[in-house]
Structures are given as C-alpha cells and as structure tokens.
C-alpha cells in the first residue's frame, strides 16, 4: 500500500464533522500521518489535544496564529504578551512538530496596516522557530514581498510554504532561499485553470515537495462538493504525479520522505 502524509489539515477544529471517521478512513487509504495545524491560540491547543487522542492514527500538531487574526478586533489578542506566553509554552508538548501557520495574506487583507501587523506577528513566530529549532508552516497569499524581506533575517529557519499556488517565478525565488523550504501542494492544483499555477506545480523539485489537504477546505475531485478529508491526500498525489509525469508510488515515497525529514515524524 502507498504511504502518504498530509502535512496540513484542520480536522481538529470544533465544527469539523466526524474527525474520528476521517482518521480511520485516511489510515485505510494509506495516509499514515497528518499534521493538525493551529490558526490561533485556541485551535493550537485543540490541535495538541487532538494529536494526543489520535496518536495511533498518526496525528501531530503545529501551533501558530494565522494572518487572518491580524484584523483590528483580533489584533489585541493575537499580538498580546499573554497570548504569546501561552503559545510558547505549548511548543514543549511532544506532539508539536512545527510553528504555524502564520505569514502574510494581502488577498483577504487590503487594509493599509496589514503589512505592519502581519510582519510583527510573523517575526514572533520566526523568533520562536529559531529558538526551538522547529520548522515553520508558512501561509503566504499574494504577499511575497514582505515575506522575502523578513525571511532574509532568518536564513536558518526551515519549513514549508504551504498551499503554494503562485507563479513559477515566485517558486524560483523561494527555492533559491538559503532556508531550503519545502513547497506544500494541495487540491488547488486539481481544479486550477491557471497555466502558471500548473507550471509551478510541475516545476517543484521532487525532493522539495510535500502534500497537504488543508481539510476541510479545497476538496479535490472526485470528492469535490463534499467537506475535504485527509484521506484525499491520495487523490492529490494521483493528480500531481500524473501532471508531473511521475510514477505514483515513487512520487508518494519521495513526498513522504520529505515530510518525515522536515518534521521529524
Ligand atoms: Zn491551513
């Protein structure tokens, strides 16, 4: 059987229906490990709890605060010393294998102070990653400039640029960074009509590619229209190996090895 790792999901979230079943089905489909990614303090705590409960199912956790949390009414909490102290304390939990997701998003955030606030928050995460040696899970959407500027100060931090769906030029710039970042590809590619996005997905070197579902979002076909589940890592692997003209088994072996190497799982 194929052995797959979903490096990014949110099935630990409160409103995810039947996460229990999702884990069972995934294990049956060869998805042996997956990372529950926190998006704020509460969901980071839940990710750890979920990972403790589903250790046998292959669950791990990541803790961080999403750039969506920098909108004005959430900013006071997301940047507060108290929140940060609590988040920092969480990284000692053995289930935690990464810091994130955090980063920059100008697709949803067009407010003028977005860049400053997201930079402040990203810096906190990068400092924590540097101090702990844990890899980062980066969310960067239509906001690569501030990311490239900030990451220059952290050449040793490793991690993944999750849900990459930009151009081959952006991909090139990321791959050239001293950080040796992995690129996380998901269901977006399975329904993308953008030739630039698909070209970028073809161009990711196999030794830098990791798979993710971003469940419950971005469901790939043939499950489109349903809530995304971590078992669909297999559909994403099938689509991408086909797109890239690679043997499915070899593709799965390589991406799984990359995820293991990066997250030490
Ligand atoms: Zn996510």
Image (spheres, helix red, strand yellow):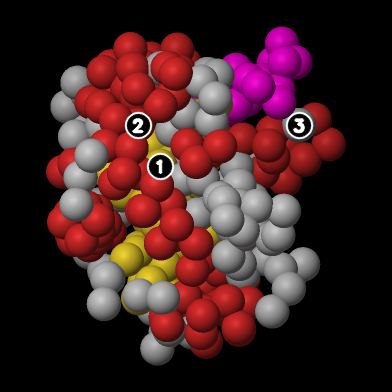
Q: Crowding near pointer 3: few (<14 within 10 Å), some, many (20+)?
A: some
First-in-chain label (1 vs 3): 3
Query: Is the C-beta separation of discs 1 and 3 under 8 Å?
Result: no
Picture layout, residue 213 above or below residue 95: above
Residue 174 at x, y = what percent?
29, 23
The residue that disc 1 covers is 185
Picture layout, residue 60 above or below residue 250: below
Q: Would you say residue 56 is visible in this rendering?
A: yes
Picture layout, residue 230 above or below residue 246: below
Rounded to the nearest whole Å, what is the CA distance between mark 3 and mark 2? Answer: 31 Å
> Dot 1 lies on which element?
strand
Residue at image location 44% in from the left, 18% down from the top: 195
Give the quarter of the figure containing the N terminus: bottom left
Rounded to the nearest whole Å, what is the CA distance between mark 1 and mark 3? Answer: 27 Å
Residue 246 at x, y = what percent?
20, 45
Residue at image location 69% in from the left, 79% down from the top: 18
Residue at image location 47% in from the left, 37% down from the top: 189
Residue 253 at x, y = what percent?
18, 61
Residue 230: mark: none
The residue that disc 2 covers is 201
Find the magenta span and give its range: 105-119
Task: Give the camera-side residue of 243 and 147.
Answer: 243
Q: Crowding near pointer 2: few (<14 within 10 Å), some, many (20+)?
A: many
């Amino acid at each position: 059987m194929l052995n797959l790792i979903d490096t990014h999901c949110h099935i630990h979230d409160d409103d995810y229906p039947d996460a229990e079943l999702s884990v069972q089905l995934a294990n049956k489909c060869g998805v042996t490990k997956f990372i529950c990614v926190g998006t704020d303090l509460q969901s980071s705590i839940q990710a750890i709890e979920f990972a403790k409960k589903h250790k046998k199912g292959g669950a791990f956790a990541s803790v961080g605060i999403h750039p969506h949390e920098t909108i004005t009414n959430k900013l006071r909490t997301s940047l507060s010393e108290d929140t940060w102290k609590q988040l920092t304390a969480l990284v000692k939990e053995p289930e935690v294998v990464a810091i994130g997701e955090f980063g920059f998003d100008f697709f949803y955030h067009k407010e003028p102070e977005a860049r400053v606030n997201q930079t402040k928050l990203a810096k906190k995460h990068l400092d924590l990653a540097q101090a702990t040696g844990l890899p980062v899970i980066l969310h960067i959407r239509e906001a690569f400039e501030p990311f490239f500027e900030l990451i220059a100060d952290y050449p040793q931090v490793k991690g993944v640029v999750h849900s990459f769906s930009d151009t081959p030029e952006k991909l090139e710039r990321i791959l050239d960074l001293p950080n040796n970042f992995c690129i996380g590809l998901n269901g977006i590619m399975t329904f993308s009509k953008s030739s630039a996005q698909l070209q970028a997905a073809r161009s990711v070197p196999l030794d830098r590619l990791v798979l993710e579902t971003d469940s419950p979002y971005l469901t790939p076909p043939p499950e489109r229209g349903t809530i995304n589940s971590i078992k669909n890592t297999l559909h994403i692997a099938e689509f991408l190996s086909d797109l890239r003209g690679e043997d499915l088994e070899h593709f799965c072996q390589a991406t799984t090895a990359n995820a293991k190497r990066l997250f030490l799982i």
